Amino acid sequence: MRFLCTLILAFLCLNHSFAQVCSENGLVFNSQEEIDNFPVNFPNCTEVIGDLMIAWDSIFSPITNLEGLSQLTSIEGVLQIEATDLVDLSDLENIDSLAGLLVMNNPLLLNLDGLGNVNSWLAGVVILSNNSLTNITGLSGTLLGDNLPTITIISGNPNLSYCNSPTLCNFLLNPTGIIVDISGNAEGCNSIDEILFTCDEFSRISHLSFYDINQNKIQDAGEPNHSNISVTLDPQEVLIVGSPSTYYVSPGNYTATYNEAENENWQLTTDSTSYFLSVEAGEEVTFAFGVYPSQLVSQLTSFITSPNARCNEDVVFDISTRNTGTTIASGTMWLQIDDDVTQINFLTPPDETVSGTPTYYGWNFTDLYPGEIFSVEVELGIPGPPDFPVGDFLNFLSYTDYNDTNGAHTSEGFRYDAEVRCSFDPNDKLVSPTRFHYEVLFDEDLIYTVRFQNTGNDVAYDVKILDTLDANLDWSTFRVLGSSHSEVLSTSLNEEGVVTFDFTDIFLPDSTSNLEGSNGHVTYMIRALDGIDENTVIRNSAGIYFDQNPPVITNTTLSVMVSMLTSTTTPDDLFPDLTILPNPNTGTFQVEGIPRGTYNLLNTKGQIIQSGQLESGTLIDISQAAQGVYFIQMMIDEQMVTRRVVKL
């Protein structure tokens, strides 16, 4: 703990000068006698240029009051108070400026009263292991202004239940520093969300959308929430997706609007398409929209998610189907498993098995309401070298047979290709469909999955994913399909196309203490805009934030939008070893596995932009070309072969 304290103190002191007023090396007090003698030894000292350390040494008398320091008005370094018998800090009420605060291991300290006049913070606040501390509202006079804390630790204070000081509330609502840890305190101060819930200067707006089965405008028992109804909250212009959900806002006036155009096939049963919400400080306002189908649309969407398929390990796969239509469905969700898995452990036993080549496993469900999801888990053994090459894919297929008021149906199949990895970045992004040339038909849904894993050495209290949607996507078609921690997920989409997936209080364990539990994911679907050009490339990546650490940026997915899936002019088996590496590329690529020939490079308008000689291993430089899709026509022995090339 002493080492931790030293590290924290060093961090807080970073970039602060130590020009002297009272002494050349800051001030250190190890006993009550030293504090009592301070006004005698330094009668004119009011400012400390440097750190002020108050840390009792057991060979001296305990420190019980700070009356001798009452003349101080400013500390340009860090105020450190450790291992004292202080009950409060009321003797420091004349101090109006601190660079940082470290309060640690003070067993009798009840509050931080005395620091209410501090109006400037440069480094941060650390409050650790003070067993009697019950509140830190004594910080309420602190004004952060432009000087926001760079570090905040409030941990291991078992009786601390009142943390709603304006200082901390403002910082947590709009954090710009590094929140290292808020945990191990009493209820009310045990997480960011708990503190914000009690912040009197902020307001809460809660949203609920529900399937109003009897159309009586109220949610009765048995009427489920509808998680995919689109609502906009102004003036922030935030698109709310998810029900129920809560948003912390500043006091003021807001308007919540039901998006009729984006809630296709649904009609409101409640009276108004919008609510005017006026919220006072500390107040919570709730609004609800009841909906009922305007058309009976049969649509279930199946999908599969999993952590990375790491070789020679057991991995849990989630197989799901969400009701994205407007009818109530019952049926069977089917799964086909790759024959190369080394073992199958059904965490959710199947209701049906259809043996054959391949074998299908089925799970029955009844009364799946619109917006609801049905999921099962299967633990699979992932193969590895030498029996299975690293980088090859395991292939899975899921679909759903179901019945509703419109009759019998089968959903579209979802193909899931899991790359076998032995050393990997666990935070990534996937897209489906995945085809050769990255082709996706204009009328197909794009299904994205963001996977994340806490590979640190401590629990992650919150995880946030920021996903900027491509401008060629129709943002109004965005719908969440499922997530690993749906009970703590809030989702919003702003006017700039940034989707925020906020997993507040997820408490995601680290991979060293719980490998399986350290993983999470979120899956959503969306469509391309109508009328975009043939061969438009849609790119997507995401930033994953664990607590307030810098983001982990995922890989970038590619999808090439086409009206018809292409084929080469020559059968693939004519040149079975033909490959283009790398593809996509950033400006250069090689063609492998062909004899001598010539090539033309064409843009999507069919214009030749480059030509040359060609043989296996030829390096082709397209660094001067713009990003996009190109076609390389290769003339080999009077045969023409065409391949797609994507430049990033």
Image: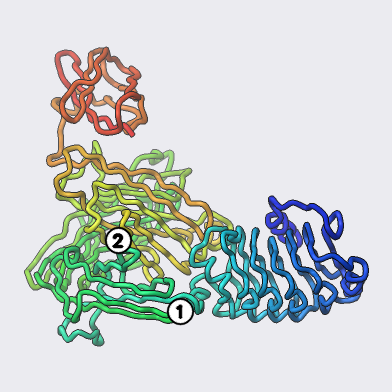
Vertical arrangement, residue 496 with respect to residue 141, above or below: above
Name the one closer to the observer, 84 or 614.
84
Asked whether the residues under the numbered discs 2 and 1 touch, taking CB atoms below 8 Å apart as contact, a structural biologist would say no
Residue 108: x and y in percent read 75, 80
Image coords of residue 468 (percent x, y): 35, 51
Foreground mark, 2 or 1? Answer: 1
- Mark number, residue 319: 2
Q: Nearer the viewer, residue 575 or 234?
A: 234
Residue beneath disc 1 = 281
Q: Given the image, on which type of amino acid does mark 2 rest?
A: Ile
Residue that lies at the very extreme toward the front in this rendered image: 44
Residue 278 image offset from top left, x and y in percent: 35, 78
Q: Residue at x 50, y 79 (%)?
A: 200
Task: Specify the quadrant of the image occupied by residue 400.
Answer: bottom left
Q: How many numbered marks does the figure carry?
A: 2
What secondary structure is found at the residue carrying circle 2? strand
Whole-angstrom CA distance, mark 2 to mark 1, is: 44 Å
Are there few (<14), some (14-19), or many (20+) residues within 10 Å of tag 1?
some
Q: Disc 1 on helix, strand or loop?
A: loop
Quarter occupied by the C terminus: top left
Quadrant containing the N terminus is bottom right
